Amino acid sequence: MLFETGTPVGVIYVLPKATEDAQSKKNSIETLSRLARLTADNIVSNLIVVDNARIEQIYANLSQSKFWETANNAIVEPFHLFNTLTAKPSRFTALDPSDFGKIISCGDCSIYGVMEVADYTEETALAEAVIDSLNSNMLASGFDLAQARAGGVIVTGSSEVLEKLPAININYCFHMISEQTNGAPIYQGVYDVDSDSDSVKIYSWFAGLGLPRDRIENLKKESLQQSAIASQKEKNRDVAMTLDLGEDKVNAVAEEINRKIKKKKSGFNKLQRGKGSIIDRRRRR
């Protein structure tokens, strides 16, 4: 309906956790397939993929009570930050709304994520963080970043932090991201934000990606394995619920004896007896 009005349609699609059941994983693959077709047909302008299994890995040490709140924030925060900061000016480098529009209208799949760097004053610290952590800090796995057709990177920190951050460090960082994406246009922004942390955060968004083939294949494999186990358990159900009391053979013998006794007592059986069982009461001369 929105597509027919000319309004761009974006979708945030969440893949299941590793611990979810086979049917959930099967349903997720089928739904992703339908969304991919809508995206290829330009009905959906941006398919953002988030993977709960990856979020589980990133926040593995959190308690159950804090996990979902943190996971939801991890999904919403980068999106909100890009949307908010690109509408603001920057004392440093601005990623303006038109650039952000190019990213989100690029089509196909998108992923985003955030990494935090504490040792930001070292010349290659940001670049090394990008090399080591870019893929692992994305909220979905299995994507080939070299396929990206556009991307955006926003570096944030407090005013005090950014005043101490050499420009060469940021330039190295952007250069490494450009290499990781095989020369895709990467729109850049550097913003000071309210923060008490003595660190730099790097928010990344990559668009124009294909489907996460490796992750999809893993989901298919997990779903088939879990389905096979469930099917085998169903087949074993009768055996598992049968209790052998050792009385079956005794009962069968008793029933056979009773059957024979009843047969002997029947009138029909008496008529069928052989000569040996007939008593001749005639007088003999």
Image (tube, rainbow, N blue to C red):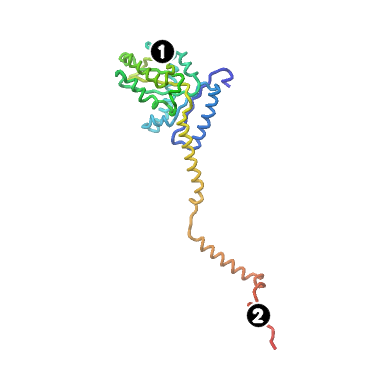
Q: How far across and down, in percent of the image, does residue 145 sit?
A: 43, 24
Crowding around mark 2 (Cα neighbors within 10 Å: few <14, some 14 to 19, many 20+) is few
In which quarter of the view is residue 277 placed? bottom right
Total marks in image: 2
Within-10-Å neighbours for mark 1: few <14, some 14–19, many 20+: some
Q: In this rendering, is residue 132 above or below 24?
A: above
Look at the image and tell me in which quarter the N terminus lies: top right
Residue 77 coordinates in the image, percent (x, y): 42, 22
Identify the residue at horizontal 40%, vertical 22% (top origin). 180
Please provide percent x and percent y for residue 163.
Answer: 31, 13
Q: Are marks 1 and 2 in contact (CB under 8 Å)?
A: no
Asked whether, in this view, residue 109 is left or right of residue 179, the answer is: right
- Residue tagged by mark 1? 94
Which residue type carries mark 1? Ala
Residue at (64% x, 73% y) in the render: 273
Mark positioned earlier in the residue sequence (1 or 2): 1
On the picture, is 166 further left or further right than 285? left
Q: Position of residue 14 (x, y in %)?
A: 47, 29
Judge whether 190 appears above or below 235 on screen. above
Task: Depth check: give the residue in front, 122 or 254.
Answer: 122
Helix, strand or loop at label 2? It is loop
Q: Secondary structure at mark 1?
A: loop
The amino acid pointed to by label 2 is Ile
What residue does disc 2 label? 279
Q: Which mark is residue 273?
A: none
Residue 197 visible in the displayed image: no
Quick one: quadrant of the C terminus?
Answer: bottom right
